[in-house]
Image (cartoon, rainbow, N blue to C red):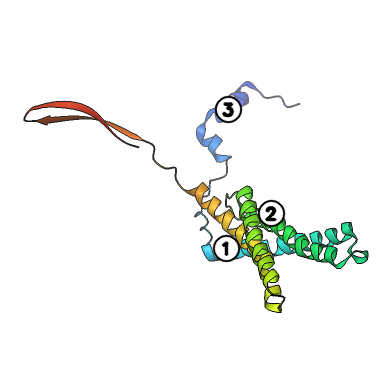
Amino acid sequence: MLLLGAPALAQVQAALQDPEVLAAGTPPTVTGPAPAPMGTPLRLGLEFGAGLVGGAAVGFFSQWAFSGLLDTSNNSTQTQHFTSLFGAPLGVAVGAPLAVTLTGYTIGEQGSFLVSWLCSMAGLAVGGGVYLTATSLSNSSAAKGTYALALLLPVVGAVLGYEFSARAAAAPPAPGPTVVPTVFFSPSGGGGAVAGRF
């Protein structure tokens, strides 16, 4: 136990009330320059790369899960075609917006996962529609090559949807209606009105 005499106790109390003494114990605040915002090409490249990786990972898993659930090794070629047609693209359409959104949040963007996912599904619909149309018209390898669109357009849709929603979130709100009282004079009289912009 520490016992202080009256003069020592008075000195401690005076020191505790002195602003210079109190300020001496706090570290100085250091204000550095704000980090520069990430350039658009780099940001889009990171989001697109993450969408490709995330879409591929979930797409491979989805393809594996579809083939395992439907046991395609013992099923008809039509069932095997179904799993190869829908397994991977559906996985890409889920994995790409997840990866794009996580990457966007990591780099400080505030986009929407829901918008990214909806645009990814729209990309899947367009890519899948092109593939189904091309293969129904022709059995050529070029028509079968349009399957790549069913894998890539969900990634493009996820990035575009995320970017549009992030830019909309960062935009200042639109100005509201403005109402101004107005007074006017003319040779035949005068009047007042309310003018506005809506």
The picture quadrant where one finds residue 21 is: top right
Type of the residue with mark 3: Gln
Q: How many marks?
A: 3
Whether pointer 3 and pointer 1 mark residues with C-beta atoms closer than 8 Å, the reply is: no
Residue reaching furthest to the left: 187
* Disc 2 from disc 1: Cα separation: 15 Å
Residue 189 has which mark? none
Type of the residue with mark 2: Leu
Residue 90 horizontal side relative to residue 36, left or right: right
* Disc 2 from disc 3: Cα separation: 62 Å
Between label 3 and label 1, give the one nearer the viewer.
1
Q: Nearer the viewer, residue 57 or 67?
A: 67
User: For mark 3, does the 10 Å Cα neighbourhood hold few (<14), some (14 to 19), or many (20 or more) residues?
Assistant: few
Whether pointer 2 and pointer 3 mark residues with C-beta atoms closer than 8 Å, the reply is: no
Residue 31 horizontal side relative to residue 60, left or right: left
Residue reaching furthest to the bottom: 141
The picture quadrant where one finds residue 131 is: bottom right
Q: Disc 2 marks which residue? A: 98
Q: Nearer the viewer, residue 102 or 121?
A: 121
Secondary structure at numbered mark 3: helix
Q: Nearer the viewer, residue 20 or 64?
A: 64
Residue 11 has which mark? 3
